[in-house]
Amino acid sequence: MQTRVLTGITTTGTPHLGNYVGAIRPAIEASRRDEVDAFYFMADYHALIKSDDASRIERSRLEIAASWLAAGLDPQRVTLYRQSDIPEIPELTWFLTCIASKGMLNRAHAYKAAVDRNTEIGDDADAGITAGLYMYPVLMAADILAFDANQVPVGRDQIQHIEMARDLGQRFNHLHGHAFFVLPEALIEDQVATLPGLDGRKMSKSYDNTIPLFAGGSRQLREAIMRIVTDSRLPGEPKNPENCAVFTLFRAFASEVETAAFRQALLDGIGWGEAKQVLYERIEADVAPMRERYEALMADPAAIETILQQGAQKARAVATPKLAALREVLGLRAMTTAPTPAGRPKVPSKQGKLPRFASFRDADGNFRFRLFSADGEELLLSRSFADPKAAGALQKQIRSLGAGAAELQIRPLGMSLALDGETVASTPDYRDEQARDDALAQLRDALDRLAAQE
Ligand code: TRP
């Protein structure tokens, strides 16, 4: 069976070497494996959240498509498309919005960071924050769930979004009693290098320290490489290859043998200017043939448009029937077709089979509560509170949390639930890791069921 691997690229920038090594190259390698069914798309609706500069978004879409194709992505083999060519994505976004708990979205890192920045400078908490930023995780969940993706390769900063997509998919499946959505997993590739930029920090558009992949041609590539910050050791003085951007960049392109030779040259005191020339030539050897294809593609946007339209058709062949099935189950069917037979099984029934809380006073007279699964199994015991209102407030928070937003800390034989970094409740200790993992699944399920009621 094939694994569907899906990932999106936000179209706000020009591809740089860091994107190539960290995302483009590994994604293309993965797409060549027989067991992988790759869906790669340009997240241009997400770009609108970050930028209102239409010409920048337009340029970025073209540059990104041309870069991926020039780097060897085969549009016959993979499904390559633009988010904005798939009307099912915003449609699904709305269906998911209607079951997303606001509490979960309050906890999304990007939104929380924006609120924290406002609070820090004494501004209104939501100053300058659009509803688009707030809804970012739901749009991303729709990107993923519309296509039944099994695995989503992303950076660590995106793990929470994948958890939320799982959470929303699971919630929908529960509410409608059927596995409509595949629950996706984040794929974090730890071997993939993050490249240092010109100043030695991670290469990133937001640090303005990038080396362009194709833009500006070989001249700009060389000029950028010559600007990489180094220490002030003179030619003849040994250089330390560790923590050295020139060396790390070289290694990302070179074979082991080449890398060993370059390390030796640094230890032997090669001058920085010469070392950078060697680096430039090594990168250029890989990039030059791709750049030729890139320039040909950039000169023929109509050819790219055709490829993307064909990609959209392939993608919609999956999403259109899926959304039709969802419309049906949500009560949005055409009135000319037969209604759902009465008594269609609904798993779980909304009432009755719910997890529940039980409050009590402990021996010291403090207030605590337990959370039990629908089957009566103890899932969580809260910390103790002198003030019953505080215990009640925590219960309320847990109700709206949902598994996606829950910070669960795993111990060898149990788990703790934290809110804003503070442990607020714990599970009992379990017999073994298997029992703990089963309990974790039950707890996640219970949190989702509670949140679905909110
Ligand atoms: N948010 C992702 C990023 O900034 C881009 C993205 C949008 C994405 N939709 C996606 C990634 C769906 C994976 C799956 O990197």
Image (spheres, grey):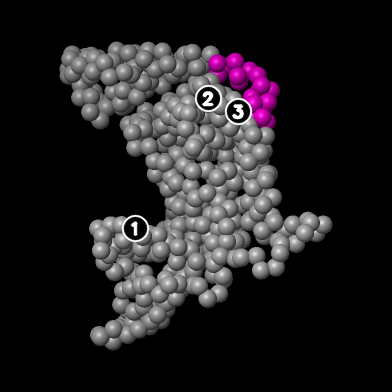
Q: Which circle, 1 or 2, is nearer the viewer? A: 1
Give me the disc on residue 62: 3
- The magenta stretch spans which residues? 293-310
Are the residues flagged by discs 3 and 1 in contact, CB closer than 8 Å? no
The first of marks 1 and 2 along the sequence is: 2
Identity of the amino acid at label 2? Answer: Leu
- Residue 301 counted in the magenta span: yes
Identity of the amino acid at label 1? Answer: Asp
Is residue 93 something that shows in the picture? yes
How dense is the environment of label 1, judged by Cα within 10 Å: few (below 14), some, or many (20 and up)? some
Q: Where's residue 216, x and y in %?
A: 51, 19
Taking the image as shown, residue 80 lies to the left or right of residue 18, namely: right
Would you place residue 26 above or below residue 234 in this image?
below
Cα distance, mark 1 to mark 2? 39 Å
The first of marks 2 and 3 along the sequence is: 3
Q: Residue at x 45, y 63 (%)?
A: 445
Q: Residue at x 70, y 56 (%)?
A: 328
- Residue 17 counted in the magenta span: no
Identity of the amino acid at label 3? Answer: Leu
Are the residues flagged by discs 2 and 3 in contact, CB closer than 8 Å? no
How dense is the environment of label 2, judged by Cα within 10 Å: few (below 14), some, or many (20 and up)? many
Most common SS among magenta residues: helix
- Foreground of the two, 153 or 421: 153
Mark 2, residue position: 73
Q: Where's residue 385, x and y in %?
A: 32, 79
Q: Where's residue 138, x and y in %?
A: 56, 52
The first of marks 3 and 1 along the sequence is: 3
Cα distance, mark 3 to mark 1? 45 Å
